[in-house]
Amino acid sequence: MTYDYDVIVVGGGHAGVEAALAVARMGKKAAIVTMDAAKLALMSCNPAIGGIGKSHLVKEIDALGGVMGQAIDATGIQFRRLNLSRGPAVWSTRVQADRIKYNQYIVDFIAACGNVDVIEAIAGEILGDSGKACGIGTEGGRTITSRAVVVGSGTFLGGLIHIGPKKIKAGRMGEKAAYKLSESLSQLGFEVGRLKTGTPPRLDGDTIDWARCEIQPGEHPLPLFSSRSSRDVFDQTPCHLTYTTEQTKAIISANFRQSPIFSGQISSIGPRYCPSIEDKFFRFADKARHQIFLEPEGNGTSEIYPNGFSTALPEDVQYEAIRTVTGLEEVKITQPGYAIEYDYCPAHQIKPSLETKLLPGLFFAGQINGTSGYEEAAGQGLMAGVNAVLYIENEPAFVLDRSEAYIGVMIDDLTTRSTTEPYRLFTSRAEYRLSLREDNARDRLSHYAHEYKLISDNEFEDFQQLRERTDQEIGLLRKKRVSVNDIGALGDRFQKKESISLEDLLKQPGVAIGDAIPIMARFDGEFSNDRQVLERAAISIRYRGYVEKQQREIEKFRRMESERIPEDFDFASIKGLKREALEKFCRFRPVSLGQAGRIEGVTPGDVAVLSVYLKKHKTIAK
């Protein structure tokens, strides 16, 4: 059979874009099937990339050759670092975007990529042949064939917008939803559920009293996401912080029943960590006020995104309530806030490769798997694109484990827990976060990126040279010593010593590379003047002992992961398991003993029983 494409990607959001580009970088032909070719990677909700945990994903996507980091570096209007009062493992980066320019950057990037076509259509059916995915049928009656299909449908799958009692069938405001595709998935035998998310009203910034709000400026030097990026210093656009008032609380509390979230109109579950403003006042009734971050949507617009004021209340109540927020007393709403329900497929139905268990060659990425967030979607999209190509080539799947990447943490969480609420990644979800830092994403993942041809030979070689320079710098820092009397106040920490190595100095809490650079300058140019090399060396020194200890835990974890469970293993034949464990094993079908032990409700005793039966299975197989 001659196929139109190697891989069809359904959806042009953040998941779809990264999936298609990964396919193209690996030398295959991809098609993005989307409703509007001009809205690729459009930011439907908050106009920003990164944040706690999420920025680690962006760094990993970049290390694997993805475009998200480059796009936000080029179009960001404000750059900030978060969590700097804590250790480098949880340092995070957040960049406010020019929403329109980000979208245009992606559109142009895709257009310049020779192996990706963008087709404007609504996918209505997943096609199969000989028990494998072989393309899609559009709602317009067109058949497009491929050797693999990636579905990254976002909130468009059965999308239904709620504003008070009003319902609108849409994937986002002003755009159609995909209902036939949901029906197709159900007909194929997939379990389909419902989730919800929401967005705040958009505001006219010219009607805001900025003097009554707290300014939040950007930072210099710019903390860029991508190793491929460079950008000159520019005047960053500030964000602002304000607060709800007692009047806000009174208005919203009096109108709880007008919100579809409380009236019973919406029964699906929303994101726990991004609740609506009405949910905040309901759940935290003793709290007098809540923070609202006023985020510009770009430099070419006065539209403002009030982060923290997501709502599905009727428009007149939204107007009344938003005008009680400090500084917003005369504000005008340019678009009302709304809640949106959409279909998803609980993730126990996918493998760690993101390929569906039910239909080979069909991959799911993003909100269809129960996640929320641009970054989570992009990470899954990239992995789905890579694995779609590996599937075509009959090669083993590319799976990152929990010790290697936050992408691995996220996908493992999904496939072992099959979340019933929108999943968001946090650094706290990673057991080995001391080893999974923003600064070492390329160290952890560049060899995979090179192996799968996601980055060029030159880029890989450049990074290898950076690693060598870092190692040389660490060696110098370990070797060079200074007199305690010659380092000023820093010497107070070493009163019983005559001299110390610069390595020991950098191990001290609160001592940054900036403190050591003036001391290093005394060594007549022996040290590098590359700040990136120095930062990498300092963090490596500070974390070496912790990482070595954690490495022992990782080795134990990997021993459990190496105990693989065959795909055809008959869990139902195991005697002595609790009913809950047996049901969970049959539902999730773990691929290793380690993964089996992470399933909620499974005990170490259950894993021990499984291990015994697994050894018997291997003996029989021999």
Image (cartoon, rainbow, N blue to C red):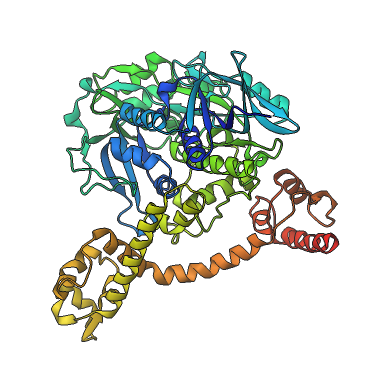
In the image shown, does 427 or 562 lie closer to the viewer? 562
Instruction: Please provide percent x and percent y for residue 439.
Output: 36, 56
Residue 575 vs 511, above or below: the answer is: above
Q: At 66% across and 30% down in the image, what residue appears? A: 134
In the image shown, does 588 or 10 lie closer to the viewer? 10
Is residue 190 rendered to the left or right of residue 121? right
In the image shown, does 30 or 438 lie closer to the viewer? 30
Residue 104 vs 370, above or below: the answer is: above
Residue 342, picture quadrant = top right
Is residue 386 rendered to the left or right of residue 60? right
Q: Quadrant of the C terminus?
A: bottom right
Could you tell me if residue 323 is visible in this image?
Answer: no
Is residue 601 rendered to the left or right of residue 451? right
- Total number of numbered discs in the rendering: 0
Could you tell me if residue 189 is visible in this image?
Answer: yes
Q: At 76% across and 46% down in the image, what residue appears? A: 586
Residue 505, picture quadrant = bottom left
Residue lying furthest front in this view?
Answer: 2
Instruction: Please provide percent x and percent y for residue 329.
Output: 24, 21
Is residue 46 rendered to the left or right of residue 551? left
Q: Quadrant of the N terminus?
A: top right
Q: At 54% across and 51% down in the image, what residue appears? A: 408
Instruction: Please provide percent x and percent y for residue 483.
Output: 18, 82
Instruction: Please provide percent x and percent y for residue 613.
Output: 81, 60
